[in-house]
Amino acid sequence: MNFIKRALCSVTRKKGKSLILFAVIFVLGNVIAGSIAIQQSTQNVEKSVKKQLGAMATVQLDYENNQEEFAKEDLKIDQLKVDLMKKIGESPYVKYYDYNAVSYSQTKDLKSASMDSEESGGMMEGFTLKGSNYHKIVDVEEKNIKVVDGKVFTQEDIDNGKNVGLISSKVAEENGLSVGDQMVMDTRGYDYTESGEEKELFKIDVPIQIIGIFEPTTVEMKDKESKKEEDQDMNQQFMSLQQLNTVYLPNKTVLEINKDYEDKLKKVAPDSQFVTEEDQEEYYTPIYVLKSPDDVEAFKQETQPLLPKLYTVKASTDQYEQIGGSMKKMSQISGYVVMIAVIATLLIISLVVLLFMRDRKHELGIYLSLGDKRSHVMGQIIIEMLIISGIALILSLITGNFLGKLVSESLLNSDILSTTTNQMDMFMTMDGLGSTDLTSDDIMNAYEVKFSLGYIITYLVVGLGTVLLAAILPLLYIVRLNPKKIMM
């Protein structure tokens, strides 16, 4: 009888020992399977949420980590140079990039979009002027807005700084405008009296030809009936208004509007608190669209050494880093459990099988004394372990997944993870990376423990690998067996 048949017969004849080994592997397999299920589910949440957030990055001042520096009176901050922005844009991780000149225009005659609800009266007046050096417009390419009529800029529009722009359909409706019309933006200059009253100083009419009309795709206007939480709804309203009241223009056009405004202010009210003594440098906010969310960390490491002092790289995926603490904590816990369970499995299975080997030393000694090769005897033991462990691991694959669901639900509903979750229930960004309200509930709702090919392969590889490693000690015992001493 060859060693393979002996292994099959040994498993079926010695039912008691086979059941003990099966029970041990099944219990430990459930722990490993449940932990891997939780770990993979948290990783899937991170991947899916980061994919939704997009792979965008910008460079900005790092106020959070340099509070002492910014508190100094003689602090001098270097402006980001266009050449540096272009150099960063040449990174292999960057798909395309833009740098935006941003301004604000307060108007009276030109009506801005407003909310229908009573609570939002006076929430926002006027327009955000967003310049672009990328003629296709990043917000259009990233599907934050959709051009419903007209077109985007041409490269000639960008290079020459033409007075052409895109407005939202809501603003077009409010002012009776359409593609091809000339929109006059009556930018007003204001100052404040000693009593705090607002005083209009001047008006500058800026003619802009409308070449395109867009609609937002990432934010929606809400009516009263759809409100659930007041704070969240107010944030949603503000983001909606900001997007609807954005006018997209070439960078040079925005800078020209700013210069005309500053010159007029200096001429009309040289003593105004808003007049600056020195000419303002051209200021841009760079936006880099990366090829993949997985490239964010590598892009940060590559870019940070190039930046002036006090600057840092911020990415759209940072929102997950702020809100997704509970998922990370759960992933860490499950990772530790996997490590502990694997170590425990190695020790327990090794000891159990070794004890069984000591009871079977006469059987093994007979095989060796009859001329059977040690490799065949060792192969028999490995096959026995693989048969028992294979059945146990396949069954624990199912029950362990169910166990992972129960444990993760208990953790998410407990106070263990709440400290991380409640630190910042909503992360709101208004830094050029888009306006997104990502809540902890969004991340929790995205979490789901389910069967996947990755889960099955990972578990079987870890489980079978652990069993095979656990077989090393019993195999060393067989190697040291002396058949003559056993048979004496």
Image: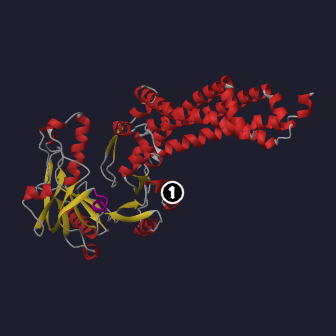
The image quarter in which residue 67 lies: top left
- Judged by its main secondary structure, the magenta piece is helix
Is 196 located above or below residue 305 in the figure? above
Q: Secondary structure at mark 1?
A: helix
Can residue 337 be seen from the camera position used here?
A: no
Residue 12 at x, y percent in the picture: 66, 29
Residues rendered magenta in the picture: 138-143
Work out which quarter of the rendered image holds the C terminus and state it.
top right
Q: Which residue is mark 1?
A: 298
Residue type of the residue flagged with mark 1: Ala
Residue ID at (67%, 31%): 11
Left or right side of 356 for 19:
left
Q: Crowding near pointer 1: few (<14 within 10 Å), some, many (20+)?
A: few
Work out which quarter of the rendered image holds the N terminus and state it.
top right
Residue ID at (37%, 40%): 446
The image quarter in which residue 181 lies: bottom left
Residue ID at (11%, 65%): 184
> Between 54 and 47, which is closer to the camera in this rendering?
47
Q: Residue furthest top?
A: 16
> Between 442 and 437, which is closer to the camera in this rendering?
442
Magenta run includes residue 439: no
Is 457 located above or below residue 350 in the figure? below
Residue 377 at x, y percent in the picture: 78, 38
Left or right side of 113 for 404:
right
Residue 113 at x, y percent in the picture: 14, 52
Magenta run includes residue 141: yes
Residue 215 at x, y percent in the picture: 19, 56
Q: Residue furthest front?
A: 1
Can residue 179 be seen from the camera position used here?
A: yes
